[in-house]
Amino acid sequence: MALSIPTDHHTILTAMLAPALLMAATGSLLVSANARLARVVDRLRSLIVAWEQDAPDRNERDTQISRHRHRAALVLHACRLLYAALACFIGTSLALAADALLGFPIVGAVPTVLAVLGMLCLLGASLNMGREVGLSVKSFDEELDHELARRRG
């Protein structure tokens, strides 16, 4: 069976462009999420060092460590969703190319399903990152309040 290669390569590339843009956006979000994860891990390490010292604010450090562990879990889950989204968008692009190269829709609704799954993964990752940012601000506010109280007292 000979493959029927369409002569309009621009149509194929145009169809593959939307998933490529989504791949680039997802990659950008992954860079940001990995940077946030690195900062959370660094902060956790500094809290653990402080936790090992017997200090009067040990209960507060325990709370901070717990919150930062939760932040790390949220970012990790977001990263996993972003990697899944990236895989879905790559699959979408490949399925579109296969459809175009084979000359008939052998893969059916696969490109659309993969694109929708990728977008749902992006939504989930965004929600996780939003929750993580909220915890980050809460931690910062509590640390600032504690430091201000210490300096006043």
Image (cartoon, helix red, strand yellow):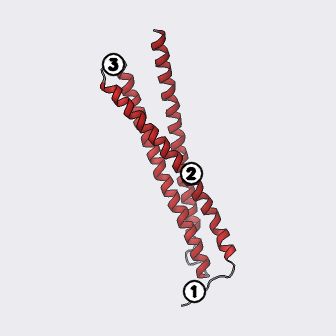
Q: Amino acid at mark 3?
A: Ala
- Specify the quadrant that holds the C terminus: top left
Q: Is 135 left, or right, of 48 in this rendering?
A: right
For image coordinates 49% across by 43% down, the residue present is 35
- Quadrant position of the N terminus in the picture: bottom right
Query: What kind of element bears circle 3?
Result: loop
Q: Could you say where residue 36 lies in the image, as x and y percent from the top left? A: 49, 41
Residue with the mark numbered 2: 28
Dots 3, 2 in contact, CB < 8 A: no
Q: Is residue 12 left or right of residue 86?
A: right
Q: Which residue is mark 1?
A: 3
Residue at horizontal 56%, vertical 76%? 98
**Label annotation for residue 55:** 3
**Three-letter code, disc 1:** Leu
Between discs 2 and 1, the one toward the N terminus: 1
Q: Point out the residue furthest to the top here.
A: 153
Q: Is residue 147 left or right of residue 115?
A: left
Spatial distance from mark 3 to mark 2, Cα to Cα?
41 Å
Amino acid type indicated by mark 2:
Ser
User: Which of these two is toward me, 116 or 46?
Assistant: 46
Q: Is residue 10 above or below residue 153?
A: below
Q: Quadrant of residue 150?
A: top left
| SS type, badge 1 | loop
**Image height check: is 106 above or below 21?**
below
Work out how far the residue at label 2 is from the one at label 1, CA to CA, in angstroms: 36 Å
On screen, residue 92 above or below 54: below
Would you say residue 130 is visible in this rendering?
Answer: yes
Mark 1 and mark 3: Cα distance apart in space: 73 Å
Q: For the residue carrying disc 1, how many other residues have a C-alpha within 10 Å: few (<14), some (14-19), or many (20+)?
A: few
Marks 3 and 2, the one that precedes in the sequence: 2
